[in-house]
Image (cartoon, rainbow, N blue to C red):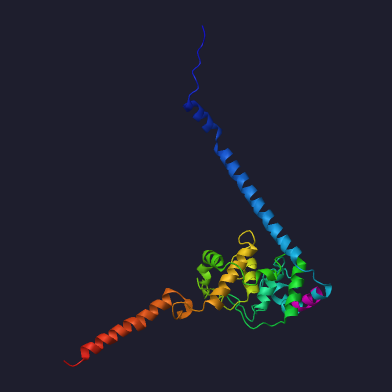
Amino acid sequence: MFRTTKPRTAKTATRKTARRRTPLATAALLGAGLLLTGGAYTAIDSATTAAAAEEAAPASAAEIENGAALFGANCATCHGMNAAGTENGPSLIGVGAAAVDFQVGTGRMPMQANAAQAPAKPVQFDEQGINDLGEYVASLAPGPAVPDERYLQADGDAARGAELFRINCAMCHNVAGAGGALTEGKFAPELMTVEPVHLYEAMITGPQNMPVFNDANLTPQDKADIITAIRWQTEVTGTIGGNSLGSLGPVSEGLFIWIFGIGAGVAMAVWIATRPN
């Protein structure tokens, strides 16, 4: 007698496939995917950082020595003699010359007093001193360099830059770049009077509560377009549609309508009611 075998059905194949897809295999696939993604991101970030470091002009020993002296006299109290950080200030190893140029070049550093956030104030060093401080910090470890001049000309695509600004920046800095309040006494500063070099440096270093937008997030041309949009809005267009009321959005506009619009309506109603018959 011959034993007949049942033909393999779709249901049987599905059960075997389901047995092969165990939870352990799924977890292994997810883990492998995360490792590959993380490795690729790290490689891209390292490559962009290395490229930025290569583009920077080499510093002289005299600049680094002078920067070290300025650092020891003005910064080491909070950041430590080796810039490794203390309980009063973070480590500066790896922040690069761009972070120094932004913080010192806008007067935020050295801080006058501990506060929730370092405000911009008059700059305390000349251009050469700021450059030497940046070269000293950059000599400690690779980090973002001061951006190339070709990205600071505000001659990019203003329409595209405005779109990128609305997506990435407007939730804190206001769609008009007028700034806004954050939590715990912190704030996003206004951008209308900020120099293009400091706008770019803020994007690549992430000062205060700002996230870092490296070249994997926003390319150098993206950053140049954002700077173009801010400059265009500040210097070219002026105020479109009347008084900007500080460009602070519906709060100031609503108060204006409430005080002057409704107030004028009430005054008119009182005037009509008090007229002699």
Is residue 69 shown in magenta?
A: yes
Q: Nearer the viewer, residue 72 or 2?
A: 2
Does residue 184 appear to the left or right of 129 in the view shown? left
Residue 107 belongs to the span the image colors magenta: no
Q: Main secondary structure of the magenta part?
A: helix
Residue located 83% across and 72% down the image: 61
Q: Quadrant of residue 219?
A: bottom right
In the image as oriented, which residue stretches furthest toward the left? 277
Count of numbered circles in the view: 0
Q: Which residues are magenta?
A: 64-71
Residue 225 point in image, percent of width and height = 59, 67
Q: Quadrant of residue 74?
A: bottom right
Q: Is residue 76 left or right of residue 239?
A: right
**Percent position (x, y) of residue 200?**
63, 70
Residue 121 % position (x, y) = 62, 82
- The residue lying furthest to the bottom in this view is 276
